[in-house]
Image (spheres, helix red, strand yellow):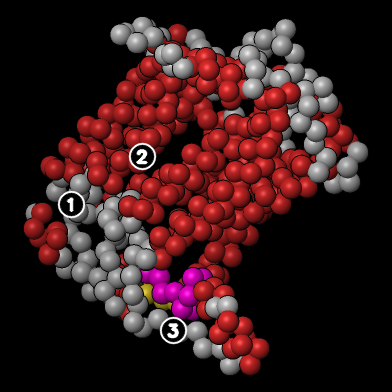
Amino acid sequence: MSFPWAKHYAPTNPLMKWVDERLPLPRLVYNAVGAGYPVPRNLNYFWNFGVLAGAALGIQIITGIVLAMHYAANGGVAFDSVEHIMRDVNGGWMLRYAHANGASMFFIVVYIHMFRGLYYGSYKAPREMVWLLGVVIFLLMMATAFMGYVLPWGQMSFWGAQVITGFFSAIPVVGDSIRIWLLGGFAPDDAALNRFFSLHYLLPFVIAGVIILHIWALHIPGSNNPTGVEVKGEQDTVPFHPYYTAKDGFGLGIFLLIFAVLLFYAPNYLGHPDNYVPANPLSTPAHIVPEWYFWPFYAILRAFTVDFILPAKLWGVLAMFGSILLLFFLPWLDTSPVRSANYRPTYRIFFWILMLDILVLGYCGGSPADPVYVILSQICAAYYFAHFLIIMPMIARSERPRPLPNSITEAVLSKHGGTSPAQSPAASALA
């Protein structure tokens, strides 16, 4: 989107002018995150989480590079090398805990970032590409996190790799070959550790590259906002700097404070105690469970228990991957012209039901495979797919949205005691 009222970069320092003429990097930064990038004036703190996700990725890359200097990707010494980092490397315990808990914090902010997109309709035109690249980032994060979970080579690492890669064998004809290709053998061992370590080290840089594309795609249409109404003019925007750099800085301070409390006071709270036991192929843990951020998808995987045309194991694998791939089609499943759930009362109700459904799936995924949790997983998995494939399209066709404001400025003034927003032409057509 072109903003005619945006400030343009004009260096006054001779050195900066010389640099800008030959390598316009200062101009790029100014236009991307400076006063040259106007943003809607009504963004709330939920818009902080994109920056927080970038900060979390930075923490993961920095700590990961240092940890890689001391880690040995060998089944015989991998567990001991992690203990060496914890006990012998200066500050190693803090780096390892920061990396392990940083992954959890990364997923927390990304989940909130995605739920904000779902609530405010940030996946709708013209921002489909922004959403699609975000889902690609999420998939890369999941692959990176899974491979990283295997590296400590504790009991849960080994058996998590054994179970999760074992599900690929459910694919007809090529399943066993894919599993052997992934592991480099018939079971997790040195070859699997080397492969997972190499990819775990590489993929964060791939994520960083896709994030650059994500931000680039965002700057073309501009940011969405809580009203879902497009920018009408200069009165609807403020420069990104200093207004939102200050707001993001405050959010980053809160994020780092929470991260520090987790790091120094509860570093093992989100981990599993079995990972402090060396991997033993001859001793299966009583309850094999992945990291908490995989629990909803793990519950969907375990929800299929009956063979119907295809084996139940294959249905579980297809449903688990399908639950993520479904997000790619979201911009075309929700056909409502109104973006924000603030103006869609029916959609808002079912949005919160979906959030509750995902939380219950997460609880079931972290619980033992008892019949009650399996049945609950089946119900919640069915609702998850029904929400996107049936309920959302039906709501888009039948819902009567509330009147939209004519502009962002009108909505802001109305909220703070100004004139009340008039009904927009789009809402009038829907009424």
Estimate how packed mark 2 is, as few (under 14), some (14 to 19) or many (20 or more) residues with alpha carbons within 10 Å: some
Instruction: Give the residue displayed 55% in from the left and 35% down from the top.
Output: 143
User: Are circles 1 and 2 on residues that touch, CB within 8 Å?
Assistant: no
* Tag 1 secondary structure: loop
> Secondary structure under badge 3?
loop
| Residue 113 point in image, percent of width and height | 46, 49
Q: Residue at x 42, y 49 (%)?
A: 133
Q: What residue type is labelled 1?
A: Pro
Tag 1 residue: 401
Q: What stretch is highlighted in magenta?
A: 31-40
Q: Which amino acid does label 3 sit on?
A: Lys
Whether residue 29 can be seen here: yes
Above or below residue 48? Residue 172 is above
Q: How many marks?
A: 3
Q: Residue 7 carries which label?
A: 3
Say which residue label 2 marks. 327
